[in-house]
Image (tube, rainbow, N blue to C red):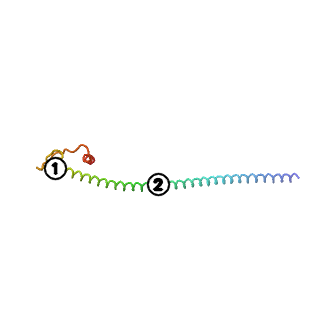
Amino acid sequence: EKAKQAADLKSQVAAERQKVKLQIAVDKATTKLRAAAEIQASAAREKDVLKKMRADRDDTKRRLREASARMDASAKTAAKMEKVLKEMKNNVDSAVDREIGDYRKDGSEYGGSGSEDGEEEALDLPTSGPVRHALAGA
């Protein structure tokens, strides 16, 4: 009977050892599964961050394209305005030249006698008015 009890006890101890070994194996496997789940969750978060970064990059590219288009349009408008201003300046210059020519021909407007001898004389132009303003802007 003692031999049977000893054998039963030995069998129980072996079963307990096997049970402990299995529990340790289950704990290790559970730990590995948790670590894998954390890694997977971290990868998903990183994927979301990358997706947002790509969206931000695409948005920035779009805004840069729009700003570039606005700058191009502004440059074209500025070029057109510059052309118009040059034209206006040329028109004013021409008008001033005509007026100056008229004053030289008929110097009586400013008390002169004109310049019949071909010698240039200093013009006594007005200090205010449209002619003086045009000359100052030229």
Amino acid carrying mark 1 in the image: Asp
Q: Is residue 42 rendered to the left or right of residue 82?
A: right
Mark 2, mark 1: which one is toward the viewer?
A: 1
Taking the spot 42% from the left edge, 55% from the top edge, the residue there is 70
Residue nearest the viewer, comparing 119 with 72: 119
Taking the spot 57% from the left edge, 54% from the top edge, the residue there is 48
Q: Is residue 55 rendered to the left or right of residue 23?
A: left
Residue lying furthest right: 1
Q: Which residue is mark 2?
A: 63
Residue nearest the viewer, comparing 122 with 83: 122
Residue lying furthest top: 127
Q: Residue 90 at what x, y percent from top left?
A: 26, 53
Q: Which residue is mark 1?
A: 106
Amino acid carrying mark 2 in the image: Arg
* Pointer 1 local density, CA inside 10 Å: few below 14, some 14–19, many at least 20: some
Dot 2 falls on a residue whose secondary structure is helix
Residue lying furthest left: 117
Taking the spot 13% from the left edge, 47% from the top edge, the residue there is 113
Q: CA distance from mark 2 to mark 1?
A: 63 Å
Q: How many marks?
A: 2
Dot 1 falls on a residue whose secondary structure is loop
